[in-house]
Image: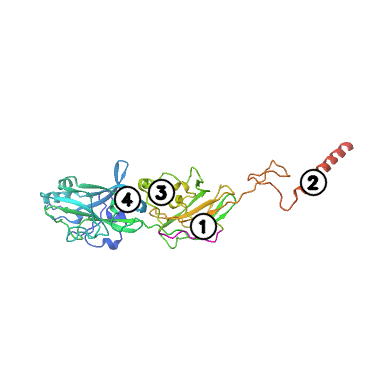
Amino acid sequence: MESPKLSLRNPPRFICTALFGVSAALWASPGWTQTPTSTSTSTTAALTTSDFTIILQRLDGSTWVDLSNIDASVYLNQARCQCATKIRFLVQMAYASRSKLASLTTTGTNAKLYVGNNCAGLNSLNVPYCPDSAILGTPLLGLSTLSSNGSWAVETTVDKIFAGVGVACTDTLTTSIVLWINTTGTISPDLTGSSAPSLAIKLDGTPPPAPTGVVVESGGDALEVSWLTEATDNPDLVGYLVFCMQGDGLQVFNPSSYNSDSNKYDCAGSSQYCTSQILCQASVPAPSTDLPSSAAGVTTASEVQAPAIFQNLNPAYLCSGLLPPSKISVRLGALQGGIPYTVGVAAVDNSGNASPIQSGFVQVPSVVQVPDATAGITGGLGRAGCACHIAGVDRGAVAWAATLALAAAGRLRRRGKRQR
């Protein structure tokens, strides 16, 4: 059998190994789908794995586009796993391989794509080596389309490829797409075992640990928020997000400059993170409750169960941009003193997974007392509604001293006139 080698044929399409960052150890196993730098010119040789390339594509408007390795790392995350977002698999053949297939094709030929989790080719029953495998899309009856056009597209949805038995979108796993193709008209495929063309798709659905040691203190019409760093413990960490709400659920910044729709994959928050509530609002799963909450640090704030808008990571309540792992504190300014605010902190990884916010921290910004410049020395109401005074000095005594000073000044002016 021809030794499999990597190729950059038909750029910018990406074959499975480059696309999903599968480990070198995994792809060292013989028979997994790879594309050679050259193709056989024989029209009588049997099919091999190197005759096929399987590509994953997403729908951009009305156009199908290949997922690059960078795009795939954030596209297939915990949120997308739960959604019926349209995708498709494109089976492609080089010209020489198409000629080979045409020479082998007889009546009763067909092809189909299997999906399963952590599968390894086809077993003796001609199905993938995994108990939860299923057929994707509609099987191809007759191979003339594949041999003449050189491609066969199978449409499906993301949730279908991660719907195996015991699979949770919060897992980190590998789903396998296996090509079953028969050119002899029998019930057995041409390529069996680990020789069957395959595409491995890695899902990173595990969110990073929630931040610990959260401290929320008053800072004068502001709140000072800090937490402990997770950067050394989690190299996948990309940063932190701070959420806040005023009183019983009021949005603090409306509209929020931290919440935009600039993500090219329809995730709000400027590509900072994705949630199923954003991506597939028609069927919103319940927030995860099986992970530990954010542990409080030494703080005067009251720790409470996080409100639903925090648990759902509602982007309307973002009160910070994406903070880098090295930044473990932030000042939330322009708040209203004397009113309680609830604050929550989430960690975000490189796949856009955000840690669930289980705990909120309630704190009241202090009122800033600002003297009223038009009120004079005897006082008046400042900006924050507080009477202006000088600490430790009796206001009446100050007023009496001011009266005596004005009288003395008047006598000096009259004396000066008499001297002239």
Residue type at numbered disc 3: Ser
The mark lying in front, picked from 3 and 4, is 3
Q: Mark 4 to mark 2: distance in Å?
A: 80 Å
Using the numbered discs, state the Cα–Cα distance from disc 3 to disc 4 in whole angstroms: 16 Å
Residue span colored magenta = 290-299
The nearer-to-camera label among 4 and 2 is 2
Labels 3 and 1: the sequence-earlier one: 3
Residue 262 highlighted magenta (yes or no):
no
Instruction: Identify which amino acid the numbered label 2 is placed on.
Output: Trp
- Horizontal and vertical percent position of residue 330: 52, 53
Question: Residue at horizontal 87%, vertical 39%?
Answer: 415
Secondary structure of the residue carrying numbered label 3: loop
> In which quadrant will I find the C terminus?
top right
- Please identify the residue farthest to the left as the structure is shown: 107
**Badge 4 element:** loop
User: Which residue position is annotated with label 1?
Assistant: 303
Mark before the other along the chain sequence, 3 or 4: 4
Colouring of the image = rainbow
Residue bearing the label numbered 3: 271
Secondary structure, mark 2, is helix
- Residue 420 in sight in this render: no
If the image is split into quadrants, where does the N terminus sit? bottom left
Residue to which mark 2 is pinned: 400
Q: Is residue 379 left or right of residue 93?
A: right
Q: Are marks 4 and 1 in contact (CB under 8 Å)?
A: no
Q: Measuring from the top left, give residue 209's x and y in whole percent.
A: 43, 59
In magenta stretch: residue 296: yes
N-terminal of the pair, mark 4 or mark 1, is: 4
Q: Which kind of residue does numbered mark 1 sit on?
A: Glu
Q: Earlier in the sequence, mark 2 or mark 1?
A: 1
Q: Nearer the viewer, residue 203 or 232?
A: 203
